[in-house]
């Protein structure tokens, strides 16, 4: 814990920040009464980008943080410490499986796991029993995505859409 000039302890929190189009997660340390708007300016200054117009959302939710919201209050309330910065409020995610595709909007803060759970559901591809044998990859690539990857980190800057392929996991025989 740090201390203010009057000797009062400041509770400090490290939180992970995912930024649109970037696979690397940024660690932001907050303390005291910093607002979301102030955080965006501070991260922008350190990162060399202007994030003031970006949407800030909490991991795996549709909830947006307002500019005057205290960052540390968000972290305490959610107990996760992960925020996502994105220009898009929603990303149109299309999942293709067996030559069929389904599309639905997701918050950029949703994880690959939440998209997979949606895709295997009875209302979509109806293969929930096979969820442990399936995975997602960005269309046109051959690298499976990890379940905790944020959708917004896969969406290219300036775009609000993402196409994924649902494929069978590669199971080594032996």
Image (tube, grey):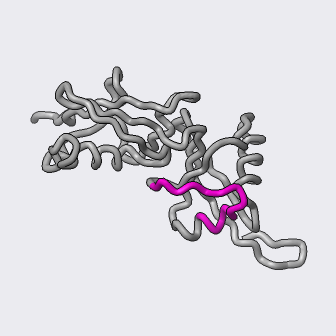
Q: Please tell me which residue lies in front, 168 or 118.
A: 118
Give the quadrant of the C terminus: top left
Answer above or below: position of 12 versus 86: below
Question: Which corner quadrant of the image does residue 88 belong to?
Answer: top right
How many badges with numbers are in the image?
Answer: 0
Query: Where residue 43 sits: x, y (%)?
Result: 71, 45
Instruction: Identify the residue at the far right of this view.
Output: 5
Query: Where residue 30 sits: x, y (%)?
Result: 70, 60
- From the viewer's perspective, tell me whether residue 9 is left or right of residue 55: right
Q: Residue sitting at 89 percent across and 77 percent down?
A: 6
Magenta region, main secondary structure:
loop
Whether residue 112 appears in magenta in the rendering, the answer is no
Whether residue 64 appears in magenta in the rendering, the answer is yes
Stretch of the chain drawn in magenta: 61-74
Q: Residue sitting at 34 percent across and 31 percent down?
A: 164
Query: Where residue 108 sits: x, y (%)?
Result: 49, 43
Q: Please tell me which residue lies in front, 92 or 21.
A: 92
- From the viewer's perspective, tell me whether residue 81 is left or right of residue 51: left
Instruction: Identify the residue at the far top of this view.
Output: 140
Give the quadrant of the N terminus: bottom right
Question: Which corner quadrant of the image does residue 169 belong to?
Answer: top left
Q: Residue sitting at 75 percent across and 72 percent down?
A: 10
Q: Residue sitting at 50 percent across and 39 percent down?
A: 152
Query: Where residue 92 sits: x, y (%)?
Result: 42, 36
- From the viewer's perspective, tell me whether residue 73 is left or right of residue 153: right
């Amino acid at each position: 814990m740090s201390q203010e000039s009057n000797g009062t302890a400041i509770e400090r929190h490290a939180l992970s920040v995912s930024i649109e189009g970037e696979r690397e997660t940024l660690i932001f340390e907050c303390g005291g009464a910093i607002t979301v708007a102030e955080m965006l300016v501070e991260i922008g200054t350190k990162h060399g980008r202007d994030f003031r117009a970006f949407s800030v959302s909490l991991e795996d939710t549709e909830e947006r943080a307002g500019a005057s919201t205290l960052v540390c209050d968000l972290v305490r309330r959610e107990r996760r410490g992960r925020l996502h910065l994105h220009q898009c409020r929603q990303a149109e995610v299309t999942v293709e499986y067996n030559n069929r595709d389904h599309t639905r909007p997701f918050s950029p803060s949703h994880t690959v796991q939440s998209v997979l759970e949606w895709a295997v559901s009875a209302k979509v591809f109806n293969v929930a029993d096979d969820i442990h044998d399936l995975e997602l990859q960005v269309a046109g690539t051959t690298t499976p995505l990890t379940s905790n990857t944020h959708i917004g980190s896969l969406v290219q800057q300036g775009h609000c859409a993402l196409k994924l392929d649902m494929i069978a996991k590669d199971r080594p025989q032996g």
